[in-house]
Amino acid sequence: MKRLNIILCSLLSLVLLAGCNTEDDVLEIFLGKTWKLTYISTENSNKQFDFWGSGDSSQSMTALKQTNTFTVSFEGSEINATTGGTFNATAITATINGQWNANGESKKMTTSDVRVSYAESDPLAIAFVRGLQNAIRYGGDSKNLYIYYKDNDNSIKRLNLIAK
């Protein structure tokens, strides 16, 4: 009887472990919502990166507070463990459209064929566009999305977005 219990417990453990999956549900994270930028930071920081130096950031911060600026939405589907499709974004005056792909296991994210309708002059808007053009990976869940990108100085920056 004791041996039967051990065998049953072992089999149950195998079934439970086989059901574990550390892969993200990329469709749930990316699709069905509009993402709003809250700030852009360096890879390991939770503070807004200073894109202004000694300049004035008030124009950027005012634009960031508007509901229809610094937004992005994703459309797509899953094919062979990779999810991808199109994205549409708005900075301050520019619209950004392109293709995206994300892998739920590796967290790798890429964008391609990115088209920008207008060259932004605001430092935060320029960084937002650059982030969408140079995505390398993502993190987060269905409420918070982090898009990591390689900046011009080869540092890694992070777009911090919330679901609207």
Image (cartoon, rainbow, N blue to C red):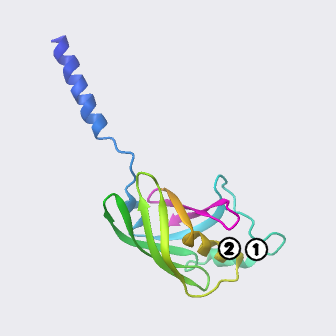
Magenta-highlighted residues: 141-164
SS of the residue under disc 2:
helix
Tags 2 and 1 in contact by the CB under 8 Å rule? yes
Q: Quadrant of residue 6?
A: top left
Q: Where residue 35 sits: x, y (%)? A: 50, 69
Q: Is residue 54 magenta?
A: no
Quote the CA–CA distance across marks 2 and 1.
9 Å
Quarter placement of the N terminus: top left
Q: Is residue 58 above or below residue 154?
A: below
Q: Residues within 10 Å of mark 1 (few under 14, many from 20)?
A: some
Q: Quadrant of residue 133?
A: bottom right
Q: Where residue 118 sits: x, y (%)? A: 60, 88
Is 99 on the left-hand or right-hand side of 147?
Answer: left
Name the residue type under label 1: Ser
**Farthest residue in the top direction?**
2
Q: Residue at x 42, y 70 (%)?
A: 33
The mark found on residue 124 in the picture is 2
Q: Quadrant of residue 149?
A: bottom right
**Circle 1 residue:** 57
